[in-house]
Amino acid sequence: MDREPLQANGESIMPDSSHFVSAASLRLRLDWLNRLRWGAVAVVLGSVLVVGPWLKLDLPMAGILTTAGGLFGLNLLYVVRNRRLPPVNIRSEIRLVKVQMVGDLLILTELLNLTGGLENPFFFIYIIHVILASLLFKGREIYQIAALAVVLFTGETLGEFFGILPHHHLLSAGDMTHELPFVLAALGAFWLVMFTCAYLGASIMKHNRAIKDELVERQASLVQADAEKMEFFRFVTHEVKSPVSTAQSAVEAALELDGDGLSTPVRGLLERGLGRLEQANRMVRDLADLTRGGELRQSEKTELDLGSLVAEVVVRFEELAASEGVGVMMKPLTAPVILHADANMVDKVVANLVGNAIRYSGGAGVVNVAVIGDADGVVLVVSDQGIGIPAEDQKRVFDEFFRTQRARELSGLGTGLGLAIVRRFVRRMGGRITLESEVGVGSKFTVRWPLEIGNDEETS
Ligand code: ADP
């Protein structure tokens, strides 16, 4: 039996701890890093152009402005690249982060050299890259980033100390900052903090990765169990379909051909049998719908007007509503609400929800149906003033064959498959369904679909 691929953001997320993030979520962090870089450029420019003259700092302005300009240019490149290329490959994204981090560390070291080196209290900014590395990389790579930061800053500081690199004084920096014991103590503290940070980051993320792997594995086995359940339903449907419809036709024919000639008890027995066979047939049809949910194909998608489709369903249910003593109201639409989807699936969703709302209204009240379209997508709301669903059953009503106690008392006809079909279809179309209900007050089912409906794989 084929195992359904587990998908997230278009990527396979089968158990694998090599990366904690997907290409898409990594891209979000890269965007965040880009914003941080704009902030850094602004802070450097602000300090140099405003704070510098104000505090009468004697710093190499041309060098600082050139380095900040370099950072600005690089960041512009990163931003344009992120806009142009969608995130597809986690490895190329990770490679890019590494290149960006090395670039950032070099630029930071250069800026520190131009603004006092060890005298500049901002030298701890290196820590941001170690934290970020622990979020994105695994053990060795985190230490490599920490080591690179330590080597660069130690090299810069000792270079200044031994006169190999130029030193630029910050305001109020005393001689103390040029004495070897101070330099060594400060560098020692820096090394300690950087490697402790790398160690903590690596340990925390190792723990998180283990949790993620377990979750992914559990989800994979849930998907597997669900696929097996569907396979079993498919098998049962296939095996039971033909005997049930043959038996139903035979009993119908017997009643039609010789119904009047039968004794009342025999006729009664046959009619009861026919009723049960009709119910079994309904169940077979529902099971077929449920298992067919996986067969949505792109070619079956059409541009459909949800408002008209819902209005048609409402008309189809007029007779049932009248016989149940229930009114059905559809909120008028000011403009068509267009959905790109498989019309059959959408029809089944709407029909199941409207049918249930009528059947579980308890013989009175009004069923309200509304279709709302906005920039995010499409919303379908079906609410009733019926028997309601107890809080403890609200999750279970979407499970196959589950019926509430009250529903069973009210009608023996249900199969308990309608909402399972609805949830499966809605999810297949990338949507979500929610339920609000109160016993004796009524129920409200809300379906939300994105405008462009895909063939989303189910993950639960
Ligand atoms: P069926 O209606 O065939 O029993 P469904 O899967 O459609 O199966 O619904 C499952 C159960 O959810 C129903 O048996 C009923 O208990 C409950 N239910 C569904 N819709 C409503 C509703 N609008 N009001 C109250 N209960 C509902």
Image (cartoon, rainbow, N blue to C red):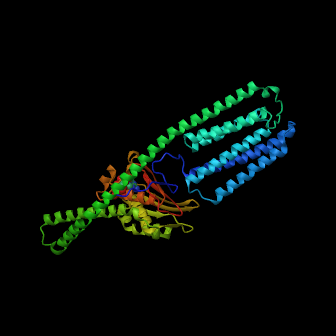
Q: Nearer the viewer, residue 224 or 340?
A: 224
Q: In which quarter of the image is ligand 1?
A: bottom left
**Residue drawn where x is 36% and y is 56% of the image:** 227
Q: Quadrant of residue 40?
A: top right
Q: In this view, does 459 lie above or below 321?
A: above
Indicate the position of residue 4 as horizontal and vertical percent values: 41, 56
Between 390 and 27, the one lying in front of the other is 27
Residue 244 vertical position relative to residue 120 in the rendered view, above or below: below
Q: Estimate the x, y position of residue 174 in percent, counting from the top left.
A: 82, 27
Quadrant the N terminus occupies: bottom left
Q: Where is residue 162 in the image (x, y as percent from the top left)?
A: 78, 32
Between 123 and 316, the residue placed more toward the observer is 123
Q: Is residue 159 left or right of residue 313?
A: right
Looking at the image, can residue 361 be seen?
Answer: no
Q: Residue at x 71, y 29 (%)?
A: 186
Q: Is residue 43 left or right of residue 304?
A: right
**Image location (x, y in percent) of residue 38:** 72, 48
70 with respect to 364 (left or right): right
Q: Report the front residue among 412 and 170.
A: 170
Decide if residue 68 is in sight here.
yes
